[in-house]
Image (tube, rainbow, N blue to C red):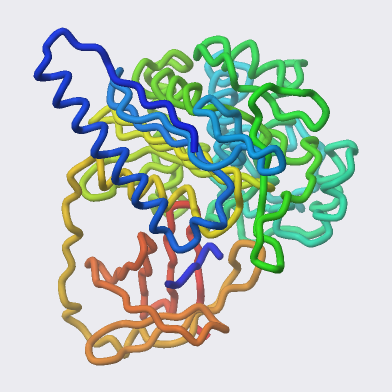
């Protein structure tokens, strides 16, 4: 499959109900869901390389499932408790986005403000707005994509070290013309929050986000402070065995990925943010979940620290996270009021996003995607297309074969078959490839990127 982004103890809660038949139906439904998820994890080819996980499914106020799998700590052989705390990585970004929008509501900043109004940074004369930082369209380089960052990631230091490291590297593209996922942008947003409020990022979130949402077990991860029930992170070593994840100092992930949380708190967060709207005014909330647009009017699927998409006919608002030893995914289906959370304490073959996607199909009726044959000449779009990607140069080759369009991301030798979805656009694995033969261009549109590639 082409990858352009190139990326047991248990608690099972039954809801009390006065009607016995309803209770029985709910119990059967919950039991069936638990059995399906158990089987999925047991049959996963990489399941032996997952230390542990915590999974929850909530529909409205009814908890369909909350369960821990595997081990929270392998040294002490400790089973994963359902209330274990995990590093949630880039799920942090939605908290940062909400904080920025709260400051906008108070008139303390505007989304049209330039980042240099708050941060010392040489943008080479290019205007870069707070809005573009929020939706990854700034064109700035992302520090996590550069090898020079990783040796320093183990050491504490002033955060503006990151800015000084990235400043000379310039831009991947002109601001507002494409989208490449960018952790530097969210570090800058954290610094803006501190500059505007005079508070630390952690203190601001404690007072204005966690307290308002009713989160009692969400906090800024700390390398020294002890938190009860915090899971240990693992990864797959060179001998295909689980090893402890590499150390990273939390001065660096910061507003891009340094929060810790639990299943229960993330469900509470989703409901407080989306359903109950405790954190933002209704109009501001609509800004939060509105897909961003490029300068030319192209609509993205990324909003502000969140992705808004449609799968199987259902609107979903979601975001995943990955950080040393941990992967996560939190999704919310607003029309059904369904929240799905998957937290895994291993960076390995079991992906949190694949898990929540599978669970989504278990819980909701998914309409099949409709495809049609392409009515034109496929040879017109064949060729090799190149341009900036996430931390590397992309080269994607397309060819026509038996009235079918195939693609591969070079230097891979594996071809993948695309399905036509109309309007000069093909797809695979929720990645869209739109061709413009007259402009000799291919646009690759993913949930967290919009890459503009030119035909070579």
Q: Outermost residue, front direction?
A: 77
* Image point (16%, 77%), residue name: 373
| Residue 435 shows in this picture | yes
Q: Does residue 236 sit above or below 158 in this rendering? A: below
273 vs 40: above or below? above
Q: Measured along the vertical axis of the image, is residue 201 above or below residue 57?
A: above
Q: Position of residue 277 (x, y in %)?
A: 40, 17
Residue 285 percent across, percent down from the top left = 41, 24
Task: Please identify the residue farthest to the top as the structure is shown.
Answer: 18
Above or below, 41 relative to 455: above
Q: How many marks?
A: 0
- Left of 417 or right of it: where is 313? left
Q: Residue at x 42, y 72 (%)?
A: 1
- Tell me the quarter of the picture where residue 102 sits: top right
Residue 297 appearing in the image: no
* Residue 166 coordinates in the image, percent (x, y): 79, 53
Residue visible at 36% across and 45% down? 38
Q: Residue at x 64, y 19 (%)?
A: 205
Residue 365, percent from left and from top: 17, 44
Residue closer to the observer: 347 or 268: 347
Judging depth in this view, the residue of 38 and 325 nearest the camera is 38
In this rendering, position of residue 441 left or right of residue 208: left
């Amino acid at each position: 499959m082409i990858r352009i982004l190139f990326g047991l103890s248990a608690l099972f809660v039954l809801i009390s109900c006065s009607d016995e038949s309803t209770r029985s139906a709910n119990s059967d439904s919950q039991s069936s869901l638990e059995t399906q998820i158990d089987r999925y994890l047991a049959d996963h080819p990489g399941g032996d390389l997952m230390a542990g996980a915590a999974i929850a499914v909530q529909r409205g106020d009814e908890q369909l499932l909350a369960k821990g799998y595997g081990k929270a700590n392998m040294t002490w052989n400790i089973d994963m408790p359902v209330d274990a705390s995990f590093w949630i990585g880039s799920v942090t970004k939605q908290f940062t986005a909400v904080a920025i929008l709260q400051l906008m509501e108070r008139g303390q900043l505007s989304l049209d403000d330039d980042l240099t109004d708050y941060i010392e940074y040489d943008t080479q004369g290019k205007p870069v707005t707070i809005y573009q930082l929020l939706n990854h369209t700034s064109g700035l380089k992302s520090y996590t994509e550069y090898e020079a960052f990783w040796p320093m990631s183990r050491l504490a230091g002033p955060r503006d070290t990151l800015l000084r490291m990235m400043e000379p590297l310039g831009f991947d593209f002109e601001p507002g013309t494409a989208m490449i996922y960018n952790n530097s942008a969210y570090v800058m947003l954290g610094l803006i929050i501190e500059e505007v409020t005079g508070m630390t990022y952690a203190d601001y979130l404690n007072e204005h986000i966690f307290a308002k949402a009713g989160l009692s077990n969400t906090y800024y991860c700390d390398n020294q402070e002890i938190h009860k029930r915090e899971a240990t992170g693992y990864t797959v070593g060179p001998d295909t065995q689980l090893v402890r994840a590499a150390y990273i100092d939390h001065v660096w992930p910061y507003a891009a990925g340094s929060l810790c949380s639990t299943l229960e708190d993330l469900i509470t967060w989703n409901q407080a943010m989306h359903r109950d709207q405790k954190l933002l005014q209704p109009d501001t909330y609509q800004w939060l979940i509105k897909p961003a647009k490029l300068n030319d009017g192209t609509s993205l699927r990324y909003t502000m620290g969140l992705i808004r998409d449609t799968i199987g006919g259902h609107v979903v608002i979601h975001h995943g996270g990955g950080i040393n030893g941990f992967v996560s995914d939190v999704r919310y289906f607003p029309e059904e009021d369904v929240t799905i959370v998957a937290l895994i304490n291993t960076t390995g073959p079991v992906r949190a996003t694949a898990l929540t996607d599978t669970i989504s199909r278990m819980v909701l009726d998914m309409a099949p995607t409709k495809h049609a044959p392409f009515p034109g000449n496929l040879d017109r779009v064949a060729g090799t297309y190149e341009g900036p990607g996430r931390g590397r140069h992309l080269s994607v080759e397309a060819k026509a074969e038996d009235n079918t369009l195939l693609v591969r991301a070079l230097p891979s030798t594996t071809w993948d078959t695309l399905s036509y979805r109309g309007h000069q656009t093909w797809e695979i694995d929720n990645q869209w490839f739109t061709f413009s033969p007259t402009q000799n261009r291919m646009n690759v549109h993913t949930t967290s990127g919009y890459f503009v590639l030119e035909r070579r």
